[in-house]
Image: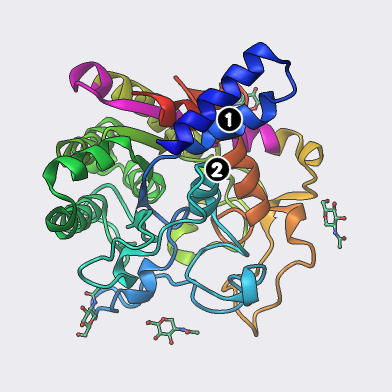
Amino acid sequence: MKGSSTCAALWLAWIVVSFQVLGAATNCKVQLQKPPAIFLFGDGMLDVGNNNYLNSTEEFGDPLRANHSYYGIDFPNSEATGRFSNGYNIADVIAKALGLGISPKAYLSLPVPISMVGFTGANYASEGARIWDTFYADDSTQVTIPLLEQVDKFVATKAQKEPKLGRSELLKLLSNSIFLLSFGTTDLFHVWYLQNLMAKNDQANVQYLLSSYGVGIKALFDAGARKFAVINVPPIGCRPVGEMPWRSRGYVRGRCDESKNKLAMEFNNGLRRLLASLSSELHGFRYSVADLYGFANATFVNPSAAGFVNTNTQCCANPCMPGFGGPCENRSQYWFWDYSYPTEKAAKLAAAAFYDGPAQFTVPINFKKLVQRK
Ligand SMILES: *[C@@H]1O[C@H](CO)[C@@H](O)[C@H](O)[C@H]1NC(C)=O
Ligand SMILES: *[C@@H]1O[C@H](CO)[C@@H](O)[C@H](O)[C@H]1NC(C)=O
Ligand SMILES: *[C@@H]1O[C@H](CO)[C@@H](O)[C@H](O)[C@H]1NC(C)=O
Ligand SMILES: *[C@@H]1O[C@H](CO)[C@@H](O)[C@H](O)[C@H]1NC(C)=O
């Protein structure tokens, strides 16, 4: 309790003496409210290397991996860790804003049982991950870890921790932790494909996709998660040129595909409603939806305001590896690093907006307030 008495003293000094210690007192408060851990679920936006450990299959081939140059070119020692970024990704910069260093390690890289030493959570995200377990009527299925499998892996983590912490300590840790989610993009490409094939299939329906997302979120809640930070889908119709072939159907080079953006907006509107309804249904459910769509859109309208020179094309050629054309010289001038994911610069700006930025980019509260919520 030494920390809190120091804080109390600082606050008292602030009240009694002057405004000069305000800065110190504020820092102290932030430190005390650091969440015990962050658990991450999603696709390549948050993956920090799980796909390196997934085995290829005969049916679907290799998973998409970022464990080779030029990925990580701006990471310490230019290490290609499996992050789909030139450096740190959104998982890292959000963990950093929360006071937890960088993203906890990829779940599949952790020893079993997971050590308590330096434990700050675990990252289950996997590039290509979808809300649905399987896709019907599509040729784009990838080797990945879909939502409910990520949830299962979290439940396995919990089971490894329980003997060490005891049940009530563990539930306390989980209820104060942040659960960061980023899903939807992979599924929406599938939805778009089905809709444009006029397929009569449940999976052509965004509302059905959202109800499947709700099942996963509820499963996390049932496992002890309380604080959900959910990143919505970006304008998926504005992906850069040089697409992965399996995702490039219907693309018009260099322009945004409004039919895909419309699907993304429908998903994002439904996502806000879904979380609002879960929070009225489930006692103790807290959430923040981060508007990546709105943030990207605002940046694309006025790129130079944030120092971007290019928000249309990717910095690194496709595939992003030696022999196919190098990456752009100045990574901080680009929004897109590769066929889908942002540069470290874009990730940092988005994370700052979600953590403690203008109210327009988070609903109903920002990540900082989510941490503080009881
Ligand atoms: C990949 O295959 C190896 C060897 O069969 C196995 O030990 C490992 O558990 C597999 N990895 C995953 C993530 O299933
Ligand atoms: C990336 O990971 C795969 C699977 O573990 C491995 O076969 C491959 O050699 C790795 N690539 C590099 C450049 O390390
Ligand atoms: C995207 O930006 C345009 C131009 O500022 C604005 O009119 C539109 O409402 C924005 N769309 C979304 C979904 O934020
Ligand atoms: C890279 O771009 C950023 C943002 O436009 C700029 O501030 C910086 O000076 C550039 N760096 C170099 C080495 O040109």
Pointer 2: what residue?
Answer: 97
For the residues labelled 1 and 2, the Cα–Cα distance comes to 9 Å
Element carrying mark 1: helix
Work out whether residue 202 can be spotted: no
| Amino acid beneath label 1 | Asp
Residue 224's x, y, as percent? 19, 39
Residue range corresponding to the magenta coloring: 278-299
- Ligand 4's quadrant is bottom right
State the image quarter where residue 173 is shown.
Answer: top left
The x, y position of residue 196, in whole percent, is 37, 43
Which residue is more in the foreground, 53 or 197? 53
Quadrant (top left, top right, bottom left, bottom right) of the N terminus: top left
Q: In this rendering, would 271 be left or right of 112?
A: right
**Type of residue at label 2?**
Ala
Residue at 63%, 55% (x, y): give it: 344
In the image, is residue 192 above or below residue 129? above
Question: Closer to the camera, 29 or 87?
Answer: 29
Please state if 261 lies on the left or on the right of 78 as rendered: left
Q: Is residue 143 above or below residue 137?
A: below
Tell me if label 1 and label 2 are in contact, CB under 8 Å: yes
Residue at the spot 59% in from the left edge and 78% down from the top edge: 69
The residue that disc 1 covers is 356
Q: Is residue 263 visible?
A: yes
**Quadrant in the picture for residue 62:** bottom left
As drawn, which residue projects farthest toward the top?
Answer: 16
Point out residue 363 in the picture as x, y percentages from the top left corner: 46, 22
Residue drawn 33% across and 33% down?
Answer: 227
N-terminal of the pair, mark 1 or mark 2, is 2
318 to 147, vertically: above or below:
below
Image coordinates for residue 248, horizontal then vertical, percent: 50, 58
